[in-house]
């Protein structure tokens, strides 16, 4: 069977089956709204939900074939120890994804969501990683095809548009990005599918396409912060995810893709809300406990640092938390005695001990 070609001239879709989509749009929008309500109650959401951002980076990269785990990434960040064979490149990709997202959010303070911003994010995504020599930040200038590793063009599943069509296709994509549409979540579904179909970069298209989801939600006013983590659902339904994307070009089935995407948004918003609520509850419980135990003005800044870096070296906390060294060591001692922290690696000679906020890690990674 020949590969499915790009749907040239059929974007944006002129017809959607709204009778099928409307029953999904309302619940998805309501779930996102409820999630935003929880986020608005989280103090310093970018701090407290930082581990969720790392987990999103892990799962989005896993869809592309990386094997590293959430725990391995946090352990590497805390210790700089050499990871297991073959995992170093995977960890770099995960850290780059997180960095690309955070910097893109900063840039959205002065730039609109645009091709320029996505090219900038793409350059950061590939910096120092596999694919780093494959034109980071630039649209591809050679033909590509999509299929299992080692597949020749004749055996590919899908062929994106030819090189000369990519700039025009992406300009049209950007016009649609900034157009007024009947429903923002459906617009996002179409934007994601079209980005993946154009496959504008030589590498990193899937990760940039998924990074687009939280960025667009902020751009469209659906969320105040880009704290939306969709990759858990897409990774769990990877085969259907790819099949629904392929069906857009093969069958013109934009409606089927939108149904899949709206379902993903609804269920993932609910899952995100549950995790954010658990993290907030843990934070409030721990804050009350640590304030009562330490009677220190530095207790809350220390707690914020621990939630942002739930696996850490004792020396990093003492040197970088902003808490006076003696007070910081006392807080860590009390937190360990109270069961908040668990020792992952004991101090040995000049090698500092490594501690973890275990209950937070359990919430994030399950």
Image (spheres, grey):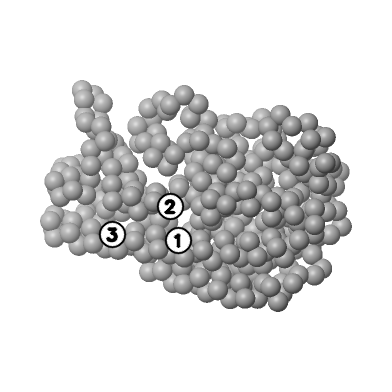
The secondary structure type at the circle numbered 2 is helix
**CB-based contact (under 8 Å), mark 1 and mark 2:** yes
Lower sequence index among marks 1 and 3: 1
Residue at 72% across, 65% down? 255
Q: Taking the image as drawn, is residue 331 in sight?
A: no
Lower sequence index among marks 1 and 2: 2
Sort mark 1 into few (<14), some (14-19) or many (20+) by Cα contacts within 10 Å.
many
Q: Is residue 200 left or right of residue 209?
A: right
The secondary structure type at the circle numbered 3 is helix
Sort mark 2 into few (<14), some (14-19) or many (20+) by Cα contacts within 10 Å.
many
Residue 120: x percent and y percent? 63, 46
The Cα–Cα distance between marks 1 and 3, rounded to whole angstroms, is 15 Å
**CB-based contact (under 8 Å), mark 1 and mark 3:** no
The Cα–Cα distance between marks 1 and 2, rounded to whole angstroms, is 9 Å
Residue at 85% across, 53% down? 8
Q: Which residue is mark 2?
A: 52
Q: Taking the image as drawn, is residue 84 in sight?
A: yes
Q: Relative to residue 243, is residue 123 depicted above or below?
A: above
The Cα–Cα distance between marks 2 and 3, rounded to whole angstroms, is 14 Å
Residue at 52% across, 30% down? 89
Residue 79: x percent and y percent? 35, 32
Residue 70: x percent and y percent? 42, 42
Residue at 49% across, 40% down? 95
Which corner quadrant of the image does residue 126 belong to? top right
The secondary structure type at the circle numbered 1 is helix
Q: Which residue is mark 1?
A: 272
Q: Is residue 156 left or right of residue 121?
A: right
Q: Which one is closest to the eye, mark 1 or mark 2?
A: 1
Which corner quadrant of the image does residue 355 belong to? top left
Q: Which residue is mark 3?
A: 282
- Give the number of callouts: 3
């Amino acid at each position: 069977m020949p590969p499915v070609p790009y749907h040239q001239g059929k974007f944006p879709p002129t017809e959607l089956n709204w009778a099928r989509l409307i029953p999904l749009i309302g619940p998805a929008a309501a779930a996102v709204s409820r999630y935003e309500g929880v986020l608005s109650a989280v103090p310093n959401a970018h701090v407290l939900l930082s581990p969720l951002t790392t987990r999103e980076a892990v799962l989005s990269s896993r869809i592309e074939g990386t094997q590293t785990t959430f725990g391995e990434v946090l352990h590497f960040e805390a210790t700089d120890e050499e990871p297991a064979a073959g995992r170093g490149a995977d960890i770099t990709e995960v850290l780059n994804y997180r960095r690309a997202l955070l910097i893109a959010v900063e840039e959205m303070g002065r730039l609109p969501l645009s091709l320029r911003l996505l090219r900038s994010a793409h350059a950061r995504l590939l910096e120092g990683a596999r694919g780093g020599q494959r034109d980071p930040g630039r649209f591809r200038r050679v033909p590509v095809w999509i299929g299992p590793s080692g597949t020749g063009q004749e055996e590919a599943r899908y062929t994106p548009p030819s090189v000369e069509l990519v700039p025009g296709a992406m300009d049209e994509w950007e016009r649609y990005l900034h157009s007024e549409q009947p429903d923002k979540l459906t617009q996002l579904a179409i934007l994601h599918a079209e980005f993946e179909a154009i496959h504008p970069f030589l590498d990193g298209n899937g990760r940039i396409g998924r990074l687009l989801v939280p960025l667009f939600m902020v751009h469209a006013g659906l969320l105040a912060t880009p704290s939306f983590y969709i990759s858990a659902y897409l990774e769990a339904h990877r085969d259907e995810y790819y099949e629904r994307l392929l069906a857009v070009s093969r069958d013109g089935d934009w409606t089927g893709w939108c149904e899949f995407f709206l379902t993903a948004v609804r269920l993932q918003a609910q899952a995100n809300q549950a995790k954010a609520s658990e993290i907030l509850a843990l934070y409030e419980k721990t804050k009350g406990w640590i304030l009562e135990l330490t009677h220190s003005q530095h207790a809350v800044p220390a707690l914020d640092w621990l939630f942002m870096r739930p696996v850490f070296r004792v020396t990093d906390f003492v040197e970088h938390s902003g808490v006076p060294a003696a007070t910081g060591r006392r807080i860590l001692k009390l937190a360990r005695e109270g069961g908040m922290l668990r020792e992952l690696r004991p101090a040995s000679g000049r090698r500092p001990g490594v501690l973890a906020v275990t209950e937070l890690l359990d919430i994030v990674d399950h």
